[in-house]
Amino acid sequence: MVDNLLQHLHDIREAAGAIFRFASGKTFEDYEQDELLRSGIERKFEIIGEALNRVRRDTPAILDQIREHRSIISFRNILAHGYDSIDNRIVWGIINEDLGDLLEDVEQLIDKKEGYPC
């Protein structure tokens, strides 16, 4: 169970890191005009949401330690199923305002689960 949890947390960390790399040096205008950039970022957000869904299934108590986990999972569902209603400003705002908090929470959980001091 811990191995699955760690794998999901590592998947979230990797996807969040990829989003930050993809967006590095980019502006909102770049994001809006670059279909490949938008697609890559949206895909990584879908991975984050799906990994959180799996955490919820396997070890739901852990979710209390991840800020806004419900909103993140809902956001994944919008990206996957409501593709025609995605607001680029919201996605860009999440990258710049919220993704760092998620990454911080996940890093702390990984450190705890791998036995390192936080």
Image: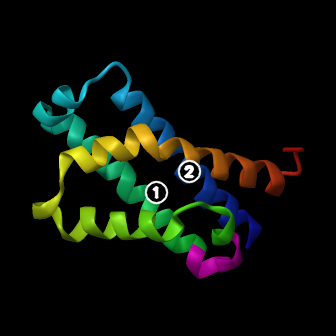
Is residue 88 or residue 46 the one in the foreground?
Answer: 88
- Numbered tag placed on residue 48 in the rendering: 1
Frontmost of labels 2 and 1 is 2
The vertical placement of 78 against 40, above or below, is below
What is the x, y in percent for residue 13?
Answer: 57, 46
Q: Which residues are magenta?
A: 56-62
Q: First in sequence: mark 2 or mark 1? A: 1
The vertical placement of 85 against 31, above or below, is below
Looking at the rendered structure, the kind of residue marked 1 is: Ile
What is the x, y in percent for residue 32?
Answer: 14, 36
Total labels drawn: 2
Question: Callout 2 environment at 10 Å: few (<14), some (14 to 19), or many (20+)?
Answer: some
The vertical placement of 12 against 74, above or below, is above
- Numbered tag placed on residue 92 in the rendering: none
What is the x, y in percent for residue 37?
Answer: 23, 35
Residue at image coords 73%, 55%? 109
Circles 2, 1 touching at the beta carbon (< 8 Å): yes
Residue 63 is left or right of residue 97, and the answer is right
Q: Residue 19 occupies which quadrant of the picture? A: top left
Residue at image coords 59%, 71%? 55
Tag 1 secondary structure: helix
Q: Which secondary structure type mostly characterizes the magenta part of the structure?
A: helix
